[in-house]
Amino acid sequence: MTTTPTGPETVLVVWKASRALEARALDSIGATGLGASDFKVLEALLHKGALPVNVLGRKLLLTSGSITTAVDRLVERGLVERHEDATDRRVRQVALTEAGRALIEPLYARHAADLEAVVRVLSDAERRTLVTLLRKLGLHAMTA
């Protein structure tokens, strides 16, 4: 009979797995030729649609300076555009341009395939269990 891992052992295993997964994801993003921040902005806009700059920054865990710099870079390249919000002129929305969509769609598909290859080691049931348990652990860690 195996012993139950201690709290520190459990956290260490989760931390190491997280670091390995993050490294693999960053390698995949690096292969796209985009920086991580630029890729994340384009991917978020692809899946969420136009977003206010501040919301985009919060979703991507980027500081206001970092999100502004990333958006500026992408505007300069013609991949995203800023426009005023229809209901609140103080809010600046960021949206993909056609060129941005044409760039990120195939890059994201390749990235998704790379990550699928990593998690393929788990069965569908194991994936569901893992995601459920990590959500539970993460939510508890935020409130503990």
Image (spheres, rainbow, N blue to C red):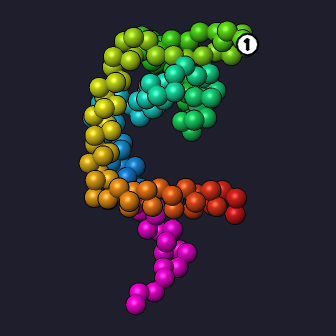
- Residue 51, x across and y down, in percent: 58, 22
**View extreme (bottom): residue:** 1
**30 left or right of 12?**
left
Q: Amino acid at mark 1?
A: Asp
Q: Residues within 10 Å of mark 1 (few under 14, many from 20)?
A: few
Residue stretch in magenta: 1-18
Q: Is residue 41 visible?
A: no
Residue at 28% from the left image edge and 42% from the top image edge:
114
* Location of residue 139 by image quarter: bottom right
**In this rendering, is residue 14 above or below 62?**
below
- Residue 119, x across and y down, in percent: 32, 53
Q: Is residue 120 visible?
A: yes
* SS at mark 1 in the image: loop
| Quarter of the figure that contains the C terminus | bottom right
**In this rendering, is residue 28 above or below 74?**
below
Residue at 64% from the left image edge and 61% from the top image edge:
140
**In this rendering, is residue 118 above or below 83?**
below
- Residue 77, x across and y down, in percent: 40, 13
Q: What kind of secondary structure does the magenta stretch mostly adopt?
A: helix
Residue at 44% from the left image edge and 12% from the top image edge:
97
Residue identifier under label 1: 88
